[in-house]
Amino acid sequence: MMILENFKVYSECKDTLIESYGDIDIAKKKILSQNSDLDEYIVEENLIAIKEGLGDKILNFFSKVVGGDIKKINTILADMKSEETKFINDEHEGESKFYKLSAALAQLKRDRSDKSEQDSILVKLNKVQKLIKDLVSSHNSIMDDLEKQVGIIIKGNKRKTEYYNLKRAEDSVETKKLRVDFKKKLISDEDSTQYLSDIQKILGNPKDAEKDLEKAQDNLSKEKDKIGASDEVSKMPSKKIESILDTYHKEIIKSIKDIKAHSDESISVLKDFRDKDAADSSAYSSMKDMFNTKKEKAVGLVEVAISKIAQVKTEENDNVQDKNKAIDYLINIKNKMSKINYIKWPSTDLDKEKERMDKVIQKISEEFQKAA
């Protein structure tokens, strides 16, 4: 488990897996393209372990990367798969009845049985055929409605479209394979082929089903290649914003701690002045100037972070919201930093001054943690 012992590569594997919408094949392709020295089986083994480790949290990670409405998309995908599975089972049941009736009718004709018996079978055949036509019509209507629903959600959002197409392709391969298995089983179970062409005009034959499966598998492969070859996934605006916040997080936190340390030192010095009754105004002014310099440095770092985030190009609604939220947080922090006042001197209660400074700095630090 070499990768799991290397935090940098482990982190890259986790991020790539999330950006690849949890697909092991796509993530593996991306990792290997960037780390040619790694063995394929080790990468795959670790990606599987990471995916299992994420467990229920993985949907939240997807939501962050793919954008809002991911749960709605997953619900619709589940409804589509459920409807297709139900249709395939109902279709198989209808086909099976039709073939059995066809075989019975063929036997009656071979035996030259009474025409009324043959007519009775024909009536049943027509009913089954109508039920199958109604089944197909109902299925198409339901799927059209579900596709319209998902179309409204993913419209104009490349990431949601990409996610939906991939997951839909995966489900399609699974359901089409089930249909092929049913078709093959049905033909092998039946003796008569006299009436097969009638029903196959509606539902298709095993070869048609196999071609549909091949198309579905080819489509899934193309979707995976498309995502695996795309650099845009790893350069999404939301990830850029996170990267900027992460880059400046340590520097800003360090500057906030620096302000706090200077404030504590100032209190100690001023207490010494008070105890000796030697108010040194020049020392106080020097400490105040140093405080303002440190404050301006911290404010400047926040301003640079705001500027860099403001320059991130966002074309999708979710990215715009992420961008605006980050900027609003940082502006709030900048305003609070700008309003920090240095210790008042002379002061009758330096402990109270320290308490005031500590509260203000603590509040700013907490606010910045939210932004990051």
Image (cartoon, rainbow, N blue to C red):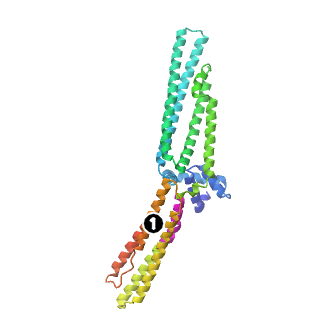
Tell me if 366 is positioned left or right of 314 in this view. Answer: left
Residue 44 visible in image: no
Q: Are there few (<14), some (14-19), or many (20+) residues within 10 Å of tag 1?
A: many
Tell me if 207 is positioned left or right of 67 in this view. Answer: right
Q: Quadrant location of residue 216?
A: top right
Decide: is 9 above or below 111. Answer: below
The residue sitting at 47% across, 47% down in the picture is: 71
Residue 7 visible in image: yes
Residue 64 colored in magenta in the image: no
Q: Predominant secondary structure in magenta?
A: helix
Q: Which span is picked out in magenta?
A: 238-252
Outermost residue, left direction?
348
- Image x and y of residue 367, in percent: 42, 66
Decide: is 119 above or below 275. Answer: above
Foreground residue, 356 or 202?
A: 202
The amino acid at mark 1 is Leu
The residue sitting at 48% across, 44% down in the picture is: 152
Decide: is 239 above or below 105. Answer: below
Foreground residue, 362 or 45?
A: 362
Residue 244 colored in magenta in the image: yes
Decide: is 73 above or below 270. Answer: above
- What residue sits right under mark 1 in the picture? 330
